[in-house]
């Protein structure tokens, strides 16, 4: 079927208790018995967040938000070793201002839905999670990361010659505190799971094959609290950050477009992409 946003969706029933819907880059399995949906990003090779993935992400969350049977979402990746490589750099390189604006609006939209969700959101971080990948994780209520020292997480934007926007910075500050955020963002630091746990960037580090089962167990603990009380508390905690972006939304888009269109920034991103490609070959 075609959603109002023009995104193709496939629906399926696995059993009486499990429903599945799938787009090109997002698949969702909803368990009616537990009220938990598992939402997986599936955009090989590295789940980089392009315009289409961001749009599908927002639509999938919106569907779950209005589904009375769904109380919680586990966000994870279908790609081994990678949670998400962050924003798709090719969406920010060599395109025109209209495209940059559309892309940034889609990112804002996705974030407002994820960070502002009434559902319990748990990030099951089963691989590397730099920059925009870290934003996804930090926007959830709880983070569980796979214990593998090859995986990293953090806001490394400065390493690419770009700057994390204020709303990335705000939720990082709320998670790990001002001093750690200042150092971490200025240096563009990426943390191993153990180090991320030490600074509170993730809440738990567990064996790779236990990430999803731990997420389900944590979800059950959060479900033990009455929904209305938990939701009002979440909204009270998160409203200032949400309002700040909503109020400055157009200025934030303008800022992004003018920043990313600079020749010097385009050059930095091109060099970074070439470095990534060389590393891979
Ligand atoms: C006055 C100023 C005011 C301030 C104004 C602020 C305005 C706002 C400014 C802009 C803000 C932008 C915010 C940006 C957020 C981001 O998320 S930027 C993206 C950052 N991401 C990264 O740095 C991650 C890069 N990737 C990696 O480190 C690795 O790929 C990996 C994720 C660790 C996986 O490694 P591995 O499994 O070894 O795979 P690779 O071989 O490296 O990659 C496979 C192919 O994928 C391509 N690729 C990787 N990441 C990306 C990406 N993010 N986007 C696009 N493509 C990517 C990589 O090039 C490989 O491609 P091929 O060689 O063609 O196979």
Image (cartoon, rainbow, N blue to C red):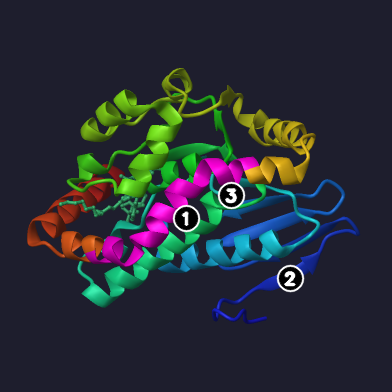
- In the image, which is nearer the foreground, mark 2 or mark 3? 2
When the figure is inspected, residue 247 is found, relative to residue 203, above or below; the finding is: below
Using the image as rendered, state which of residue 64 and residue 224 is in the foreground: 224
Secondary structure of the residue carrying tag 2 is strand
Rounded to the nearest angstrom, the CA distance separating label 2 from label 3 is 18 Å
Using the image, tell me which numbered label, if any, was put on residue 78: 3
Q: How many discs appear?
A: 3
Figure quadrant of residue 214 = top right
- Which residue reaches farthest left? 264
Using the image, tell me which numbered label, if any, was put on residue 65: none
Screen quadrant of the N terminus: bottom right
Rounded to the nearest angstrom, the CA distance separating label 3 from label 1 is 20 Å
When the figure is inspected, residue 214 is found, relative to residue 11, above or below; the finding is: above
Spot occupied by residue 38 in the image (x, y as percentages of width and height)? 68, 50
Secondary structure of the residue carrying tag 3 is loop
- The residue drawn where x is 60% and y is 29% is 208
- The residue drawn where x is 60% and y is 24% is 206
Using the image as rendered, state which of residue 179 and residue 45 is in the foreground: 179
Can you identify the residue that label 1 sits on? 111
Do the CB atoms of the residues marked 2 and 3 lie less than 8 Å apart? no
Spot occupied by residue 198 in the image (x, y as percentages of width and height)? 45, 17
In the visual, does 30 lie left or right of 45?
A: right
Q: Where does the magenta region start and end? A: 233-254
In the visual, does 201 lie left or right of 280?
A: right
Spot occupied by residue 146 in the image (x, y as percentages of width and height)? 55, 29
Can you identify the residue that label 2 sits on? 11
């Amino acid at each position: 079927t075609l959603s109002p946003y023009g995104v193709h969706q496939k629906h399926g029933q696995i059993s009486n208790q499990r429903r599945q819907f799938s787009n090109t880059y997002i698949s969702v399995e909803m368990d009616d018995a537990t009220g938990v949906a598992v939402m997986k990003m599936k955009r090989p090779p590295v789940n980089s967040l392009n315009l289409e993935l961001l749009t599908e992400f927002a639509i999938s969350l919106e569907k779950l938000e209005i589904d009375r049977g769904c109380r919680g979402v586990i966000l994870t990746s279908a790609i081994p070793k990678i949670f998400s490589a962050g924003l798709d750099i090719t969406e920010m390189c060599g395109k025109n201002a209209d495209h940059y604006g559309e892309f940034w609006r889609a990112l804002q939209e996705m974030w407002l839905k994820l960070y502002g969700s009434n559902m319990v959101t748990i990030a099951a971080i089963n691989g590397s999670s730099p920059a925009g990948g870290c934003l996804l994780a930090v926007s959830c209520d709880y983070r569980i990361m796979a214990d593998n020292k090859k995986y990293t997480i953090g806001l490394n934007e400065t390493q690419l010659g770009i700057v994390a926007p204020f709303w990335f910075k705000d939720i990082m500050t709320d998670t790990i505190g001002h001093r750690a955020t200042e150092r971490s963002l200025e240096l563009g630091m990426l943390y191993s799971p153990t180090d991320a746990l030490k600074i509170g960037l993730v809440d738990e580090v567990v064996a790779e094959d236990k990430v999803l089962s731990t997420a389900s167990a944590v979800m059950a603990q959060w479900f033990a609290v009455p929904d209305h009380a938990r939701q009002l508390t979440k909204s009270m905690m998160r409203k200032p950050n949400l309002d700040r972006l909503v109020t400055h939304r157009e200025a934030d888009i303008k800022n992004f477009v003018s920043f990313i269109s600079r020749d010097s920034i385009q050059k930095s991103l091109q060099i970074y992409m070439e470095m990534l490609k060389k590393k891979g070959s």
